Amino acid sequence: MKNPMQMMNFLKGVKNPKDAVINMIKSNNNPMVKNLVEMAEKGDNKGIETFARNMFKEQGRDFDSEIKQFMNNFK
């Protein structure tokens, strides 16, 4: 958002940072992002996991090893 008025309109009604982030994500025009938001709103964890696995596979990365490494940060 380059226009300050767009930002002001965007932040109208936002009560906390979480709402601001959710609004930013929802305003994204990328169909893949919109699909992910819909899955998250529906609680479709399996769909989100499948999406992530496919994305990692396309990048030549291993989802299982990377998620394990990520989760180790929280132990």
Image (cartoon, grey):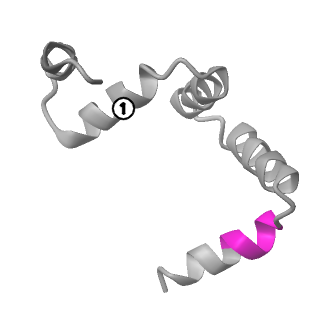
Q: Is residue 38 visible?
A: yes
Rendering quarter of residue 5: top left
User: Measured from the top left, where is residue 34 in percent x and y?
Assistant: 58, 22
Name the residue nearer the viewer: 40 or 23: 23
Residue at image position (36%, 32%) is 22
Q: Nearer the viewer, residue 57 or 40?
A: 57
Residue at (14, 20) in percent of width and height: 4
The residue to which callout 1 is attached is 22
Q: Give the quarter of the figure containing the N terminus.
A: top left
Tell which residue pokes out farthest to the front in this image: 2
Q: Is residue 31 left or right of residue 11?
A: right
Residue 29, image x and y in percent? 53, 17
Q: Which residues are magenta?
A: 62-67
Classified by dominant secondary structure, the portion drawn in magenta counts as: helix
Q: How many marks?
A: 1
Residue 9 in the figure: left or right of residue 73: left
State whether residue 18 is above or below residue 53: above
**Is residue 65 one of those drawn in magenta?**
yes
